[in-house]
Amino acid sequence: MTTAQVALPEKLLWVFSGEADVRGAYGGRGSGKTRSFAKMSAVRVHMWDQAGREGLFLCGREYLNSLEDSSLEEIKSAIREEPWLLPHFDIGEKYIRTVSRRIHYTFSGLDQNINSIKSKARILGAWVDEAEPVSEDAWVKLIPTLREDDSELWVTWNPERADSATNKRFRSSTDPRYRIAEINWRDNPRFPVKLDRDRLRDKQERPEQYEHIWEGAYKTFVEGAYYSRALLDAKEHKRIGVVPLDPLMTIYAYWDIGGTGKKADATAIWICQFIGKQINVLDYYEARHQPMAAHVAWLRKRGYKDAFCVLPHDGASGEAIVDATYESALTAAGFNAETVPNQGAGAASMRVEAARKLFPRIWFNETTTEAGRTALGWYHEKIDEKRGIGLGPDHDWSSHGADAFGLMCIHYTEPTSTDMPQVDTTDWVA
């Protein structure tokens, strides 16, 4: 009996060794993870075929409108790379199966076909590629379809957000039967020279995208993001780090008001101090469906019981379920509060421009403002795809933190020379 050898990046040797219920890899472009999983799927299918097994190997993606969107061609190429493996497969234009016809690949989109997948007979294994956008509902329905004693789920993805269903289910898991590895371009011994030129070009010309695309970092900037360059500049000039609270200076809390209903927006708060012409951003808070008491409790717990609260124009309005305004509720809780008047049409764009102007003097406390900076990096222009024109800021999950940040910038008043501390020099010796 001869033993076949398969070349894999070193980081994936552990992933494909031993027993597991889930095997996976996440990271950036050029890591070799997709080709490696495609090749190992063929190895596993061949082993089952040699053992006389019958069934399907499912290759899924969240969105798959045609076979052109599937892993079909990737698996074909992976099989053809291995001369010892190729004779065992029948490869057609739209199918891959073993020569014995006992096992064949099937390709499916999870967003529309997840219920039909449940009825497929004898799924021996499943590989979900580009798995970042797969919903929790899809995972809940897919995993029980793998009923064989040695069935495994394989998952590969480029992370975008820490709170995605895929990241939370697999990357954060401590289950000993989950074998998940991070792998990036530098871990691929066959990383192509052409791809390296692309990588270096992105690093130079598109630095706001580089970490996500090539290093497997979470996606912190999207196309059309208002503050991507400003945040990169803050990082480059070391204005994101340790920023201490000055106990002698006023603490400001800038709000974007949400609500308590199921469909209500999130409430966001930025904590900052103005030290001369420098703006020190100390902390960030965001919560959804929480009452005013929860927000007040956070302020007190973090030591901001004396914060001067600045509210957007709806701070003078009350929710239908309470007989109070946000401003009056904060005043009753012992805070000084002010409501900024409605800025009228174009208010969101005014906040963006004010923030861009002030960004060079803004310093962020790194550990406590990460979630807020993620929101700022995502906040972007909504585009009319048909006409190719901007429609103003997109009101999505990031807009709450961005609106509160913009309120800070609109409310800020630059100190004049008479506002600055004066030094008595009468007793100085020349």
Image: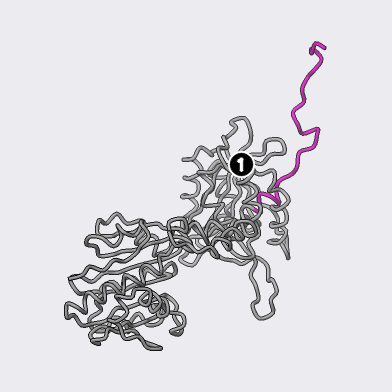
Q: Which residues are magenta?
A: 406-430
In front: 219, or 416?
219
Q: How many marks?
A: 1
- Is residue 363 or residue 264 the one in the foreground? 363
Quadrant in which residue 4 is drawn: bottom left
Does 416 lie within the magenta span?
yes
Q: Secondary structure at mark 1?
A: loop
Q: Amino acid at mark 1?
A: Lys
Which of 197 and 346 lies nearest the eye of the viewer?
A: 197
Can I make out residue 200 in this image? Answer: yes
Query: Looking at the figure, which quarter contains the N terminus?
Result: bottom left
Dot 1 corresponds to which residue? Answer: 238
Picture coordinates of residue 94, whole percent (x, y): 39, 88
Location of residue 165 (image quadrant): bottom left
Q: Residue at x 39, y 64 (%)?
A: 166
- Graded by Cα atoms within 10 Å as few (under 14), some (14 to 19) or many (20 or more), the crowding at tag 1 reads few
